[in-house]
């Protein structure tokens, strides 16, 4: 398996993504610059976090129009595994691969802390290993998930919610919803299940020496999605 780690101007979590894939998941991974127009030879895509184009426009909006995103969409449509973390989630929403959008946190402050996630739809390659709440770090200023009433209803009805912010015991409380996201939504999958977008950073929790390897439960979905292609 060979995974493309897409780099945009302003990406700052690309090394975390690359080394978690190579060293901890044990797959091939290479950087791909956003101006590339081909992902030939790759089996999947990781869109890392960062501040693409400085987030001077709506976060992820400019990156969504980069040349490489046409190829990312092709891989999505072909059923290949595609994951976007933090800014990568924002980009997937801006391209329309995933529904909704990410706006400024409800407290209008940058958040950098560990949060608990519970898997909502366990019937996906990305969530099936997460059988209890796991602690995963966040680092974002624009992580509040929003959608129209109709879109939110569709998201819930179609089982597109992958993860929700929660307490350590799995309870959904106002305090646990750290950025004010609608319905505590921390991550989504597409209807086919080969795409995951989430605001937390599982690639930062893939070694015991980092405090936990719980992130591997999520990023190992690359293997499971590809096995079904």
Image (cartoon, grey):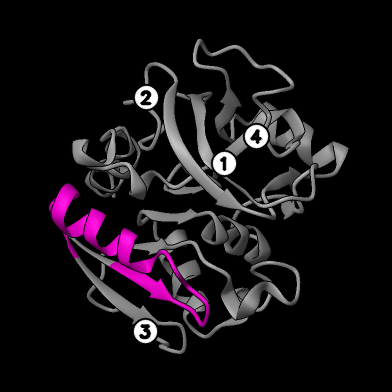
Element assignment for label 1: strand
Q: Which residue is mark 3?
A: 38
Q: Which mark is residue 162?
A: none
Q: Are marks 1 and 4 in contact (CB under 8 Å)?
A: yes
Give 87 or 119, whichever is nearer the viewer.
87
Q: Which residue is mark 4?
A: 185
Classify mark 3: residues with Cα within 10 Å, few (<14), some (14-19) or many (20+): some
Number of callouts: 4
**Is 78 colored magenta in this rendering?**
no
Q: Quadrant of the N terminus?
A: bottom left
Element assignment for label 4: strand
Q: Is residue 72 left or right of residue 104?
A: left
Q: How far apart in space, not on screen, are marks 3 and 1 (Cα)? A: 26 Å
The numbered mark, 3 or 1, whose residue comes first in the sequence reads 3
Q: Which residue is mark 1?
A: 188
The numbered mark, 3 or 4, whose residue comes first in the sequence reads 3
Q: Is residue 114 visible?
A: yes
């Amino acid at each position: 398996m060979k995974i493309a780690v897409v780099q945009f101007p302003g990406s700052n979590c690309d090394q975390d993504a690359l080394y978690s894939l190579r060293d901890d998941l044990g797959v091939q991974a290479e950087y791909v610059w956003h101006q590339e127009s081909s992902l030939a030879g790759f089996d999947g895509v990781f869109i890392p976090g960062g501040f693409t184009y400085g987030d001077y426009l709506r976060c992820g909006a400019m990156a969504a129009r980069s040349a490489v995103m046409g190829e990312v969409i092709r891989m999505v449509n072909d059923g290949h595994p595609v994951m976007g973390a933090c800014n990568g989630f924002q980009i997937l929403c801006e391209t329309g691969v995933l529904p909704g959008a990410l706006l400024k946190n409800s407290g209008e402050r940058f958040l950098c802390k560990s949060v608990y996630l519970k898997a909502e739809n366990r019937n996906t390659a990305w969530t099936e290993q997460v059988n209890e709440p796991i602690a995963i770090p966040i680092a974002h200023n624009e992580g509040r998930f929003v959608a129209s009433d109709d879109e939110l209803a569709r998201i819930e009805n179609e089982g597109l919610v992958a993860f929700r912010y929660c307490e350590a015991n799995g309870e959904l409380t106002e305090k646990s919803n750290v950025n004010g996201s609608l319905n505590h939504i921390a991550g989504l999958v597409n209807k086919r299940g080969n795409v995951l977008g989430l605001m937390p950073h599982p690639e930062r929790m893939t070694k015991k020496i980092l405090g936990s390897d719980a992130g591997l439960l999520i990023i190992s979905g690359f293997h499971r999605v590809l096995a079904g292609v």
